[in-house]
Amino acid sequence: MKHFVLIIFSLFFFSQFVNAQTELRFNNIDSLFKYAENHSISIKTGKQQVLLAKWQKISAQAGIVNFKVLTSFSLIDNIQLPVTYLPAEAFGGTPGTFKEVTTGQQYMGNLNIAPQIDIINPASWAKLKSANINSELTDVNNLIVRKLIFESISAGYFNIISLNEQIEITQQNLLTADTLQMIMQNKYSEGIVRQQDLNDAMINQISLADKLEQLKIGLTQQYYALKIVCDIPETDHVVITDKLNYSQQFSIGMQASNQLQYQSALLKVEQSKADLSTNRLSQYPTVSLVAYDAWQQNSKNMFFDNNVNWRNSQYFGLRISLPFPDINRFTLSKSSDINKTIALQNAEHTKLQENITNAQMNLDYEKAFSQFRTTKQIFLLKEENYRMALNQFKASILPSDRLLVSFNDMLVSRLNYSNSLANMLYTESKIKINNSIK
């Protein structure tokens, strides 16, 4: 009975684990980009930053007129009224003496409304310009983040495709290595080869099996790295089904032309200029329309006394506010001026750096394409050498060590051929990403 309960519990736990896992299959890189667009925390954070910049812009627009209504309402119970000493003779008393007089009202109600609107506010105009620039800068920086994320995704994607291909190639060649070991075992049994030759074949088979395990571990690591970039839950099972296409056409004349970093640097220059203007214009006067409307009721009996009228007072006019010059405003202006100079120098450097980065990407693609053609030629020659070596070994013309060397050379060249194709596809994808996100 205990064993039966344990089996039922184990089946239930296993079914819950299977149900908790979600399999995500991607057959092309665009589908992975789309997933990242919807799930990447970095991209989602960027969207929130855009929303924040939008509200900062709205706040700056409202700050131009700075419309505000200061309203206050108070009810005061003067529990102990103040006492004033007045000459007694004013009340018919003895000259030279004083009479205690209680002044004021015990119950006081006040309603004050003071609207104000700025009609000339230079600092707010500069803040609006800064907010507009900040909104543009946020958009550009989010594009830079998106580009970097897509480049990381592209690197992981093609690494996984390459590793899948290498695993498949190694598995096939492991079968060949098993066959070579069997052939060597038979020849050893017949006394044709030495124990050392048989040992070399066994070492070759063991090394290849270990390489296969290392490739599988590397593939798992790449999937973990891809999950981090795309913010894929750890429990989800990711499968990339895309395969390397050795016969596809390639765009040799493709050129990278991304200038996002330079755009960001130029916007930072404009932002530093706006900050400088804000600090300078904050020392200028502000002209405002102001008004005041107040209602007051004083009573000796109670709050909201029906026997006492509310008294009203009003005014309307212009107010000029002039900040008093101080050292802090002066130093802020000087700091902003220095920051503007630094931003200009950074922009100049960024332009040079970005042009070189684009040129480097173009060279990387040309280099990758050249390596792909070279590794293809080498692999075809190494494969032919291995087939001839195998035939010569079977005919007892070639020693076993030369056969194993030829086999390993062929395997290495085949893996290099696969790696070079994946690397070329990555460099091509990187240029496409840079040309599409800008």
Image (spheres, rainbow, N blue to C red):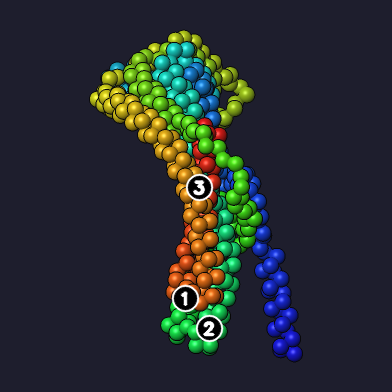
- For the point 46% across and 64% down, the residue is 409
Please provide percent x and percent y for residue 217: 51, 66
User: What is the crowding at mark 2: few (fewer than 14 residues within 10 Å), some, or many (at least 20)?
Assistant: some
Q: Mark 2 belongs to which amino acid? A: Lys
Q: Which of the two discs, 3 and 2, sits closer to the camera?
A: 2
71 w.r.t. 253: above or below:
above
Badge 2 marks a residue whose secondary structure is helix
Query: Is there CB contact under 8 Å for labels 3 and 2?
Result: no
Quadrant of residue 335 within the rendered picture: top left
Identify the amino acid type marked 3: Arg
Q: Are marks 1 and 2 in contact (CB under 8 Å)?
A: yes
**Residue at position x 54%, y 75% from top?**
395
| Marks 3 and 2, how far apart at CA | 39 Å
Decide which of 406, 97 is in the foreground and name it.
406
Please tell me how crowded label 3 is: few (under 14), some (14-19), or many (20+) other residues with Cα within 10 Å.
Answer: few
Q: Which mark is residue 187?
A: 2
Circle 1 is placed at which residue position?
A: 400
Tag 3 near tag 1, CB within 8 Å: no
- Three-letter amino acid code at the position of disc 1: Ser
> Disc 3 on helix, strand or loop?
helix
- Horizontal side of 331 relative to 59 (left or right) equals left
State the image coordinates of residue 233 (x, y, percent, origin top left). Answer: 59, 57
Q: Is residue 42 visible?
A: no
Q: Is residue 401 something one can see in this rendering?
A: yes
Q: Which residue is mark 3?
A: 373
User: Of marks 1 and 2, which one's residue comes earlier in the chain?
Assistant: 2
* Residue sitting nearer the eye, 266 or 100: 266
